[in-house]
Image: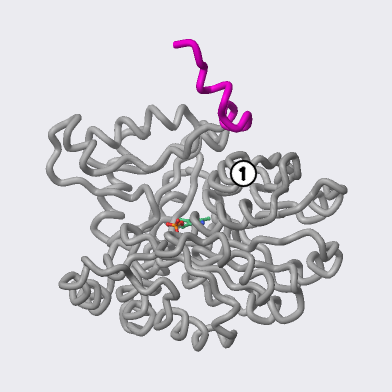
C-alpha cells in the first residue's frame, strides 16, 4: 500500500490504548465451555434492570422502524424533576461515555490539556486523546484524586478537569466541602467534569450535593449514567447536567438520534421504580459489608469504597489470580491498564455470588 493510513489519522490515535472492557460471559463460555458463569467485573446491577423498565422497553419494540424522539422529551422532563433543573440544562447521551466524548469534542482545542487524576476512569484519557487533547495525569494520594495538586497543575493550556466521584476503579471519594472549596479556587474558564456514575449508591450526608454545586459553579458539568444502579448498561443511556449555555453547545454536536426508543423508555421507567432502586442499594450495602469482613479475614488489604465494587491487593500477580478465578467460572477485573498489577476489582454481586467468589479466592490464595 502506498498510503499509510496511520499517517493520515489524528496523531493522538497512535498513542491511544483502547478501553479494555471486562471479560464477557460469552467469551468465557467459548474459551472454557463453562456454563454457569458469575460476572462481577463491570459494575453492573446484579439484580438486573427494573421489571418496569424492561416492560417499557418492550412496549417500544413495535415501533422500532421509527426514529426515536431526538429531543428525548419525556426522559428529559423526568430528569428535570428529579434534579430540579430546567430541561435546557440536560443533554442525553448514548451512555455517559458518549457525553464525555461530546464534552471533549465541544471544548478541547487541539493541544489543550485535560487534567485527569492518577487511577481515574480510563475513558477520560481515551476521549481526550481522540479529540486532539493532551491528558495530564496528576498523581493521586492514597488512591484518591489530590485536589491541591490538580489546582497546582492548571496552566494556560488547561481546558478540562475530569473527576469521577466516587472514582472507578478505586471507589474513593471527595466530600462536598472539599469539592466546593476546590471549585471556588478554579478559574471559570476551566471546565470541571464531575462523573457521578455511582452516585445512587451513596447516601452519606457529606457526599457532594451536585445540584447545589451546579447552582454555584457555571463551569461544572455533572455526568450520570443508567448503566449502574438502574441496570441498563446494554441500552446505553446517560446524561449531563450543566448551565444552559454549555448544554446548548453540547446539543449542537450531539448526533440527532443518539439514544434509542427502548433506551429512552426504559430509563424513564427505571427512574420511577423506587422499589428497585432501594433493593439495589440495600443489596449493595450488605454485599459491601460482607466483602469488607471477608477480605479482612483473608488478610487482603482493600481500598475502602462507597461504590458497587471493591478493589483489593492480591499481593501477587493479579492476572494470575484472575485467570484462576476464570477457570472456576468467575469473572473479576484485573487493573493492569491502571498500573495496579497486584489489585483486582470486584463488583458487589448477589449474596450467593459473593460467597462463591470469596470461597474461590481463599482456595486460590492459600
Ligand atoms: C461505569 C462508569 C460509567 C458509565 O459509563 P456508561 O457509558 O454510561 O455505561 C461512567 N463513568 C464511570 C467512572 C464509570 O465507572
Is there any visible trace of residue 268 in the rendered image?
yes
Residue 151 locus on image (x, y percent): 83, 54
Q: Residues within 10 Å of mark 1 (few under 14, many from 20)?
A: many
Residue 314 locus on image (x, y percent): 46, 36
User: Where on the picture, by quarter, is residue 247?
Assistant: bottom right
Q: Is 22 or 345 nearer to us in this picture?
A: 22
Q: Is 136 or 80 nearer to us in this picture?
A: 80
Quarter of the image with the C terminus is top left
Q: Is residue 349 left or right of residue 135?
A: left
Q: Farthest residue in the front direction?
A: 2
Q: Is residue 157 left or right of residue 74?
A: right
Question: Which residue does the image show at 24% across and 77% down from the upper left?
Answer: 56
Question: Which residue does the image show at 47% across and 63% down from the upper left?
Answer: 93
Q: Tell me, what colour scheme is on the image?
A: one colour
| In the depicted structure, whether residue 182 falls above or below residue 130 | below
* Dominant secondary structure (helix, strand or loop) of the stretch shown in magenta: helix
In the rendered picture of this protein, how many numbered marks are placed on residues?
Answer: 1
User: Where on the picture, by quarter, is residue 64?
Assistant: bottom left
Mark 1 secondary-structure assignment: loop
Residue 330 locus on image (x, y percent): 27, 42
Is there any visible trace of residue 141 in the rendered image?
no
Residue 249 locus on image (x, y percent): 64, 66
| In the depicted structure, whether residue 278 falls above or below residue 92 | below
| In the depicted structure, whether residue 208 falls above or below residue 17 | below
Quarter of the image with the N terminus is top left
Magenta residue span:
1-15
Q: Is residue 161 a member of the stretch shown in magenta?
A: no
Residue carrying label 1: 131
Q: Is 290 or 5 nearer to us in this picture?
A: 5
Question: Which residue does the image show at 38% across and 27% down from the upper left?
Answer: 320
Label 1 residue near ligand 1, CB within 8 Å: no
Question: Which residue does the image show at 64% across and 75% down from the upper left?
Answer: 210
Amino acid at each position: 500500500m502506498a498510503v499509510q493510513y496511520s499517517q493520515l489519522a489524528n496523531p493522538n490515535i497512535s498513542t491511544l490504548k483502547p478501553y479494555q472492557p471486562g471479560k464477557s460471559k460469552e467469551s468465557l463460555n467459548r474459551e472454557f465451555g463453562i456454563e454457569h458463569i458469575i460476572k462481577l467485573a463491570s459494575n453492573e446491577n446484579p439484580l438486573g434492570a427494573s421489571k418496569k423498565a424492561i416492560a417499557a422497553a418492550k412496549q417500544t419494540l413495535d415501533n422500532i422502524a421509527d426514529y426515536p424522539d431526538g429531543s428525548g422529551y419525556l426522559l428529559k422532563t423526568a430528569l428535570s424533576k428529579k434534579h430540579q433543573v430546567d430541561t435546557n440544562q440536560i443533554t442525553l447521551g448514548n451512555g455517559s461515555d458518549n457525553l464525555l466524548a461530546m464534552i471533549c469534542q465541544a471544548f478541547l482545542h487541539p493541544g489543550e490539556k485535560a487534567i485527569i487524576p492518577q487511577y481515574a476512569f480510563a475513558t477520560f484519557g481515551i476521549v481526550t486523546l481522540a479529540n486532539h487533547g493532551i491528558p495530564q495525569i496528576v498523581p493521586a494520594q492514597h488512591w484518591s484524586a489530590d485536589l491541591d495538586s490538580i489546582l497546582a497543575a492548571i496552566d494556560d493550556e488547561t481546558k478540562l478537569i475530569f473527576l469521577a466521584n466516587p472514582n472507578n476503579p478505586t471507589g474513593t471519594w471527595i466530600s462536598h466541602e472539599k469539592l466546593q472549596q476546590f471549585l471556588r479556587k478554579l478559574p471559570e474558564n476551566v471546565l470541571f467534569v464531575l462523573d457521578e456514575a455511582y452516585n445512587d449508591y451513596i447516601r452519606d450526608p457529606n457526599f457532594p450535593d451536585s445540584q447545589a454545586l451546579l447552582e454555584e459553579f457555571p463551569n461544572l458539568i455533572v455526568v450520570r449514567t443508567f448503566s449502574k444502579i438502574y441496570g441498563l448498561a446494554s441500552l446505553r443511556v446517560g446524561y449531563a447536567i450543566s448551565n444552559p449555555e454549555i448544554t446548548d453547545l453540547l446539543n449542537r454536536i450531539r448526533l440527532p438520534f443518539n439514544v434509542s426508543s427502548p433506551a429512552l423508555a426504559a430509563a424513564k421507567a427505571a427512574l420511577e421504580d423506587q422499589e428497585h432502586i432501594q433493593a439495589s442499594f440495600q443489596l449493595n450495602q450488605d454485599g459491601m459489608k460482607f466483602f469488607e469482613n471477608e477480605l479482612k479475614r483473608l488478610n487482603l488489604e482493600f481500598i475502602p469504597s462507597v461504590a458497587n465494587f471493591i478493589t483489593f491487593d492480591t499481593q501477587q500477580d493479579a492476572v494470575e489470580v484472575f485467570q484462576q478465578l476464570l477457570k472456576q467460572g468467575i469473572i473479576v477485573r484485573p487493573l493492569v491498564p491502571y498500573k495496579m498489577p497486584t489489585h483486582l476489582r470486584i463488583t458487589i454481586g448477589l449474596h450467593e455470588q459473593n460467597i462463591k467468589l470469596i470461597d474461590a479466592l481463599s482456595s486460590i490464595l492459600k
